[in-house]
Amino acid sequence: MAANIGTGRAVSSTFAPLRIWLLLPGWLSIGFFLLIPVLLMLVYSFLTKEFRGGVIWEPTLAAYDQFFFDRGLFGDDPRRIEWKYISIFWRSIWQAGGATLLCLIIGFPTAFFIATRPDRTKVIWLLLVTVPYWVNLLIRTVSMKFLIRDNGPMNDFLQYIGLINEPLQLINTNIAVQIGLFYSYLPFMVLPIFAAVERYNFTLSEAASDLYADKWTILRRIVIPVVSPGIFAGCILVFVPSLGAFLAPDLLGGAKSFMIGSLIEEQFKGNIGNWPFGAASSMILLSLVLVALFFYARAQSQGERA
Amino acid sequence: MSETAIQLESVRKDFGDFTALSEVSFEISDNEFFTLLGPSGCGKTTLLRLIAGFLNTTGGTIRLFGEEIEALPPNKRPINTVFQNYALFPHMTVRDNIGFGLSMLGWSRSDVATRVDEMVSMVKLDQFAERRPSQLSGGQQQRVALARAMAPKPKVLLLDEPLSALDLKLRQEMRLELKRLQNETGITFIFVTHDQEEALSMSDRIAVMSAGKVQQIGSAVDIYEFPENRFVAGFIGETNLIEAEVIDASADALTCQLVNGAVLTARSLHEITKGQKGWVSIRPERMTLSKTKPKGNSLSGTLTGATYLGTDNQYAVGLTDDLSLNVRHQNRTSVGAAMTTGEPVHISIADNAARFLVD
Ligand SMILES: Nc1ncnc2c1ncn2[C@@H]1O[C@H](COP(=O)(O)OP(=O)(O)OP(=O)(O)O)[C@@H](O)[C@H]1O
Ligand SMILES: [Mg+2]
């Protein structure tokens, strides 16, 4: 960290006059492709919906109201909390958390394994991890559906080796969604952890073992804390897109596993949608992510200062 | 003689078909400051890693206070290491670093705290106890590494070139510091260095290593004054080596004929018989130049060069066209000042200064 800041300073002093011009393309593209669409959504979320999709330029809080409150079928009942969308959000967080945990459990050992291979074979392993990603996400998710369905190869195999008698009912469950998300985002967990472990100085493990620590203690007290920035980065990179994913929940989870991504997607698809409501849901999701990142960043910087 | 702390018996280590160490046998007694000295790649670190348990021996045995330790992993050996690059835990404070080994040994929190306080003040880091390693200077990090390794009161402390990353002044300070700590704690030190001055000034005994073998073990004086072979004579300090043959051997002195035909008296550590071929080694500072032929052991030649080195003056004396000796005078003696190059000179050799080496 400190080293990065140091380099930044050196560069900024050398290129001080050029700095604005050098950064301009970056700022422009961030502004154009990132900020403007988000602002657009922010604006849309406060507009009135038009019935065939699209918006009417009339400001209203209706979209947010619809998200949080239930006013009955005709909108004139006393206001009650609407649990439908909140629970979809809650389920999404839960699903994304499960997928992140799954990625961490499988991804950490994988990353550790790859990082400790000799230089020549490292590249091959890394390439292998990314191989599935050369195939379209939709295709991969559909294949996953075939793989884990009731009479699919996985169940056949497990029955064949006698581990189970009845096929596992995975499809259309939360577990299936988590498996799907795990499969979609595993490399985002593996790569940052790989980078951190590769930088890890294994003399530290030797030093700990010299100071009477056993293998598990070394992993827990030395390796994991030292590579934790990589672990956190991996968790964020998996959690955030999982939260908004819609392919895996749609294809693997069925109606019961409806998630934020599907909810938002539905609002913008075809002509049954509700753009302001979709935009409002996106803004609520974005706020949640920002709050989480804020707390994470604060915890990190406090850890560094202590 | 005190107890034997470490005993190595024909220890051998192969990496694939490369032999990094062979026939390493020696004993280190309790409370000793023992140094492994040798050029880069001679196997010093490998030997330490075998003792610490990070590597397994290919052959031979290592005993710690009489017990074989081959089967014990590093965390079961009452031996601690100060690593060359310190290997401090970056996410822990100085206190936590020093206390790590103690908590691993199952000490209670309060005992750990007491011991850590003691160590922190022993290495004079009181003001820095709550800092992270990245907030310390190289010398301070070095002290933390030392305190961390000494806190669990190991029976043997291994130090792998602990001073090599420090600047000269700090290195000289730390030498004294290390010596003091070793005296205070009575821990057996095995110290690795390739700096001969460090080795000579700190050690009780030194093992000079080369190409995976121990060449000689002895005190600083033994190794400097009575080298076992040409490698030791040349690695520790400077020397002149002249091919020679023994033409007469009596009980305490050998008469040697040098390649240029000159004859002088030399001594050897070993029983030597007449006709043995070998080398005569003479340190530059154990010779004196004079214009007139001196009594006793002496050689004669032509002064071919003089170099002013500040503390010393160095002279080159040609015995024949392709045989030249270096002679050093301390700057306070005015001998030689009056001599000019090209002049014939005589070299007087101090008693016991000419050593006959077989290989
Ligand atoms: N893991 C290994 N695999 C193969 N060869 C090794 C390994 N470790 C050390 N060696 C070889 O063993 C020899 C001794 O290495 P070692 O690290 O003990 O040297 P050293 O005396 O400590 O040198 P330095 O003063 O440079 O630290 C070297 O030639 C080195 O290349
Ligand atoms: Mg070494």
Image: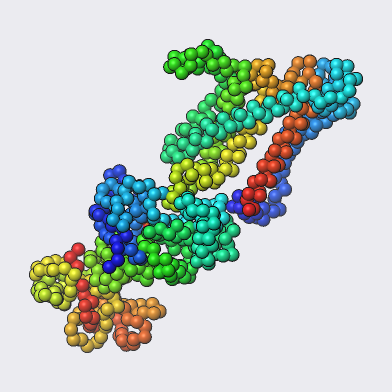
- Which residue is nearer to you in this view: A34 or A168? A168
Percent x, y of residue B189: 37, 62
Quadrant housing residue A270 = top right
B266 left or right of B180?
left
B49 left or right of B60?
right
- Which residue is nearer to you in this view: A273 or B102? B102
Residue plotted at (68% across, 27% down): A92
Q: How is the image coloured?
A: rainbow
B265 left or right of B23?
left
Residue sitting farthest toward the top: A151
Query: Can see residue B131?
Result: yes
Percent x, y of residue B130: 59, 58
Percent x, y of residue B273: 10, 68
How many numbered circles does the render carry? 0
Residue plotted at (19% across, 70% down): B269
- Which residue is nearer to you in this view: B104 or B179? B104
Percent x, y of residue B314: 33, 78
Image height of A168 relative to B305, above or below = above
Residue plotted at (60% across, 50% down): A1
Quadrant housing residue A57 = top right
Query: Can see residue B139?
Result: no
Residue plotted at (68% across, 26% down): A91
Image height of B256 relative to A210, above or below = below
Image height of B121 relative to A24, above or below = below
